Amino acid sequence: MKKIFLIASLIMSIFVLSCTAASDKNPKGKQLTCYSYSHHGTVAQPFEDIEVRKTDSCCTACVFTSGDDDFTYKTYAVGEDLLDSIQNVIINHKMYKYKNHYEPIFEVLDGDSWHYEAVYSDRTILSSGGHCAGPKDDGTTVINNIIKNYVKKCEVIKSETWEERVGR
């Protein structure tokens, strides 16, 4: 009987700890310092590569979309309000509850993959990705559209080709 009680207590402890750990990932009230997103197919070049980063001196957004005519990474000077907008979407879409990785039900030998990461000043990291699958409520699409619309009114401070960026 003691063994059953001990095993049941251990299982309950693990359950309680796992619930606590999941709730700690909620970033409400934390300061977002970096958001990155990449979307790749089976080709070497990404379809989309986006990063918004806050440093001590400034806040920048680097955007690459393969649909652009010139295939360049463009870095823009942006305001910290962009990170605030991203943070709101992360909370409203509960992106902190995304699985670590999404896979399709059936094996797919071709296709695309994606990954997002949000880093906070207290070193909390939210991360998720997938191959030919993702969450039903896709906050990354909302965030990426906010970023792409935001940078339309910003100054380009650096422009480089994909080859220059990856050192080819």
Image (cartoon, rainbow, N blue to C red):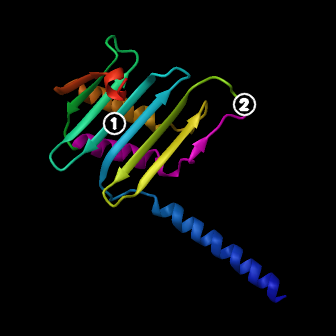
Amino acid type, label 1: Glu
- Residue 40, how many percent across, how many down? 50, 27
Q: Which mark is residue 82?
A: none
Question: Is 164 included in the stretch rendered in magenta?
Answer: no
The boundaries of the magenta stretch are 81-105
Q: Which mark is residue 107?
A: 2
Query: Is 168 placed above or below 16 here?
Result: above
Principal SS element in the magenta part? helix
Amino acid type, label 2: Glu
x 58%, y 71%: residue: 17
Judging from the image, what secondary structure is the residue with disc 2 in?
loop
- Residue 45, how many percent across, how many down? 45, 22
Left or right? Give the position of 129 relative to 81.
Answer: right
Query: Is 18 placed above or below 82 here?
Result: below
Quadrant for residue 14, please give it: bottom right
Q: Which mark is residue 51?
A: 1
Give the quadrant of the N terminus. Answer: bottom right
Q: CA distance from mark 2 to mark 1?
A: 30 Å
x 64%, y 23%: residue: 110
